[in-house]
Amino acid sequence: MRNMLVVSCMRKAGYTAFSGDGLQAAQAPDNATALPAGAWGYLGTAVAAAQGFHPPRGNPPRPTGPAAGSGEAYDNARVDCDRQAAERIGTPPGPGTDLVGRLFDESIGAANRDARVTAATREWSACMAAAGFRADDPAALPERFRAAPEVTPTELATARADADCTGTSNLAGIWFAVLAGYQQQQIDRNAQALTAQQEAVRAQDAKLARLLAGDGS
């Protein structure tokens, strides 16, 4: 929502075609292609067969010309609008934000070390080997291919095997269930601090809504 303040500011400054300049996507990502591979393997056989480990091709066209903006005046306006948005919104209390980030990182680490996840990962790895692909780490597997400019037949075959083995080992189902369990434990142990952070974020959102209403956005 902060991006909306920046957009409003830039348009008032005369850059009427400004729509976020990378701050926000022109359209929401397709859930089938947003995060196809991770520590939990590859989700989506159809996507694997079409794009491998590469992101989907094709981005919405960006505005061009004077209205979109370029040059020193545009850059100065952009920096000023960012500053104005940050000053007007403020930030939720730092300790709460830091706590949420720390707990999230800890939950990911705990899930990856959990015996249920490591057992499912071994089953996934054995399945990949049976399909002719050596792989021990589902999260590292995509990195073998993402630097390549084009999707290759080998990448597509590897991604299809990854998707199939993720399903047969139930790696994704186990990983997400285990992660949710650890995160619920964290919520229970840190309920007071997390509730305070939630209230701070809600107050910030309400403040932003009032600012946007005042801007006519």
Image (cartoon, rainbow, N blue to C red):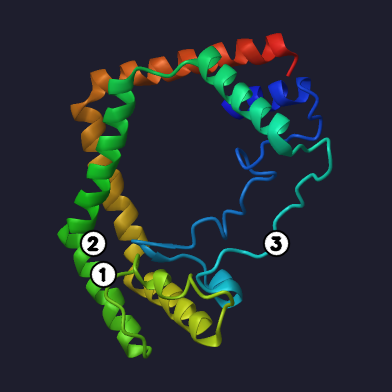
Q: Residue at x 30, y 59 (%)?
A: 174
Question: Counting residues from the N terminus, which is met first, the one under dot 1 or under dot 3?
Answer: 3
Judging depth in this view, the residue of 33 and 154 nearest the camera is 154
* Residue 185 appearing in the image: yes
| Quadrant in the picture for residue 168 | bottom left
- The quadrant of the rendering that contains the N terminus is top right
Q: Position of residue 145 (x, y in %)?
A: 46, 75
Left or right? Give the position of 151 relative to 198: right
> Counting other residues with Cα less than 10 Å from the Cα at mark 2, is it few (<14), some (14-19), or many (20 or more)?
many
Find disc 2 in the rendering and name its residue: 117
Answer above or below: position of 187 versus 48. Answer: above
Residue visible at 15% across and 61% down in the picture: 115
Identify the element where label 1 is drawn: helix
Q: Which residue is mark 3?
A: 58
Asked whether the viewer can see residue 1, the reply is no
Q: CA distance from mark 1 to mark 3?
A: 33 Å
User: The C terminus appears in which quarter of the rendering?
Assistant: top right
CB contact under 8 Å: marks 1 and 2: yes
Asked if the residue under mark 3 is in contact with the one under mark 2, i.e. CB atoms within 8 Å, the reply is no
Q: Amino acid at mark 3?
A: Gly
Q: How many numbered callouts?
A: 3
Instruction: Identify the mark at residue 138; answer none if there is no mark.
Output: none
Q: What residue does disc 1 label?
A: 121
C-alpha distance separating marks 1 and 2: 6 Å
Q: Residues within 10 Å of mark 3 (few under 14, many from 20)?
A: few
How far from the left and from the top, in percent, is residue 193?
Answer: 26, 20
